[in-house]
Amino acid sequence: NELMTAADVLLSDYSSAVFEWAVLDRPLMLFVPDLDSYERSPGLYLDLRTEMVGTRVDDAAHVAATVLALPEAAPDHSEFVARHLGTDLGAASERVVERFVPA
Protein backbone atom coordinates (compact mmCIF):
# COMPACT_ATOMS: atom_id res chain seq x y z
CA ASN A 1 0.00 0.00 0.00
CA GLU A 2 2.85 2.41 0.72
CA LEU A 3 4.04 2.15 -2.89
CA MET A 4 0.65 3.21 -4.21
CA THR A 5 1.37 6.81 -3.31
CA ALA A 6 4.51 6.74 -5.48
CA ALA A 7 3.00 4.96 -8.51
CA ASP A 8 1.52 6.67 -11.55
CA VAL A 9 -0.64 3.76 -12.71
CA LEU A 10 -1.86 0.50 -11.18
CA LEU A 11 -1.93 -2.72 -13.15
CA SER A 12 -4.13 -5.13 -11.25
CA ASP A 13 -6.33 -8.13 -11.79
CA TYR A 14 -9.24 -8.95 -9.50
CA SER A 15 -7.54 -7.56 -6.40
CA SER A 16 -9.34 -5.43 -3.84
CA ALA A 17 -6.40 -3.02 -4.20
CA VAL A 18 -8.46 -1.46 -7.01
CA PHE A 19 -10.78 0.08 -4.42
CA GLU A 20 -7.90 1.61 -2.46
CA TRP A 21 -6.30 2.85 -5.68
CA ALA A 22 -9.53 4.48 -6.89
CA VAL A 23 -9.31 6.99 -4.04
CA LEU A 24 -6.11 8.36 -5.61
CA ASP A 25 -7.86 9.19 -8.92
CA ARG A 26 -4.96 7.82 -10.94
CA PRO A 27 -5.05 5.61 -14.04
CA LEU A 28 -5.96 1.98 -13.46
CA MET A 29 -5.53 -0.97 -15.77
CA LEU A 30 -7.22 -4.29 -15.16
CA PHE A 31 -5.36 -7.25 -16.62
CA VAL A 32 -8.19 -9.74 -16.99
CA PRO A 33 -7.55 -12.10 -19.91
CA ASP A 34 -9.66 -14.77 -18.19
CA LEU A 35 -12.63 -12.52 -17.36
CA ASP A 36 -15.30 -14.77 -18.90
CA SER A 37 -14.20 -17.87 -17.00
CA TYR A 38 -13.46 -15.93 -13.80
CA GLU A 39 -17.01 -14.52 -13.83
CA ARG A 40 -18.38 -18.06 -13.86
CA SER A 41 -16.04 -19.39 -11.16
CA PRO A 42 -15.21 -18.11 -8.60
CA GLY A 43 -17.38 -15.16 -9.61
CA LEU A 44 -17.28 -11.43 -9.04
CA TYR A 45 -19.10 -9.04 -6.74
CA LEU A 46 -19.64 -6.51 -9.51
CA ASP A 47 -19.63 -6.43 -13.28
CA LEU A 48 -16.16 -5.43 -14.45
CA ARG A 49 -17.58 -4.41 -17.82
CA THR A 50 -20.10 -1.88 -16.48
CA GLU A 51 -19.40 -1.11 -12.81
CA MET A 52 -15.61 -1.01 -12.55
CA VAL A 53 -13.33 1.94 -13.21
CA GLY A 54 -10.18 1.58 -15.25
CA THR A 55 -9.13 0.23 -18.59
CA ARG A 56 -9.41 -3.50 -19.24
CA VAL A 57 -6.48 -5.26 -20.91
CA ASP A 58 -7.00 -8.78 -22.16
CA ASP A 59 -3.57 -9.54 -23.59
CA ALA A 60 -0.15 -9.20 -21.95
CA ALA A 61 1.33 -8.07 -25.25
CA HIS A 62 -0.86 -4.95 -25.13
CA VAL A 63 -0.06 -3.81 -21.57
CA ALA A 64 2.75 -1.39 -22.49
CA ALA A 65 0.81 0.10 -25.41
CA THR A 66 -2.20 0.59 -23.18
CA VAL A 67 -0.12 2.40 -20.56
CA LEU A 68 1.24 4.73 -23.25
CA ALA A 69 -2.29 5.37 -24.57
CA LEU A 70 -3.79 6.31 -21.20
CA PRO A 71 -5.23 9.83 -21.17
CA GLU A 72 -3.08 12.53 -19.57
CA ALA A 73 -6.00 13.93 -17.59
CA ALA A 74 -6.53 12.38 -14.17
CA PRO A 75 -9.50 10.04 -14.11
CA ASP A 76 -12.48 10.90 -11.94
CA HIS A 77 -13.29 7.91 -9.76
CA SER A 78 -15.48 9.92 -7.36
CA GLU A 79 -18.76 8.16 -8.21
CA PHE A 80 -17.11 4.74 -7.92
CA VAL A 81 -15.51 5.71 -4.60
CA ALA A 82 -18.78 7.11 -3.23
CA ARG A 83 -20.69 4.00 -4.28
CA HIS A 84 -18.22 1.48 -2.85
CA LEU A 85 -16.36 3.36 -0.11
CA GLY A 86 -18.84 6.07 0.82
CA THR A 87 -19.20 4.94 4.42
CA ASP A 88 -15.45 5.17 5.00
CA LEU A 89 -15.08 8.48 6.81
CA GLY A 90 -11.42 8.06 7.71
CA ALA A 91 -10.04 8.41 11.26
CA ALA A 92 -11.49 5.02 12.24
CA SER A 93 -8.93 4.52 15.03
CA GLU A 94 -9.83 7.87 16.55
CA ARG A 95 -13.54 7.00 16.55
CA VAL A 96 -12.86 3.62 18.20
CA VAL A 97 -10.80 5.27 20.95
CA GLU A 98 -13.47 7.92 21.55
CA ARG A 99 -16.18 5.30 21.78
CA PHE A 100 -14.49 2.55 23.78
CA VAL A 101 -11.59 4.03 25.74
CA PRO A 102 -12.62 6.01 28.80
CA ALA A 103 -11.16 9.50 29.00
Image (cartoon, rainbow, N blue to C red):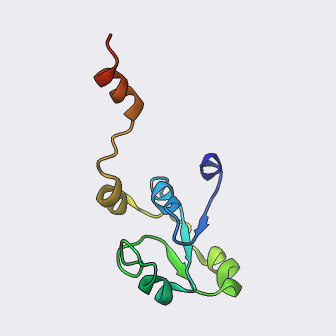
Q: Is residue 43 shown left or right of residue 57? A: left
**Which residue is depicted at the point 32% across and 61% down?**
79
**Which residue is depicted at the point 47% across and 57% down?**
25
Q: Is residue 49 shown left or right of residue 4? A: left
Nearest to the observer: residue 61 or residue 35: 35
Outermost residue, top side = 103
Quadrant location of the C terminus in the rendered image: top left
Nearest to the observer: residue 79 or residue 41: 41
Q: Is residue 79 shown left or right of residue 39? A: left
Q: Position of residue 92 (x, y in %)?
A: 38, 34
Q: Position of residue 31 (x, y in %)?
A: 58, 77
Outermost residue, front side = 42
| Residue 84: quarter of image | bottom left
Q: Is residue 85 visible?
A: yes
In the figure, 93 relative to 42: above or below? above
In the figure, 11 relative to 2: above or below? below
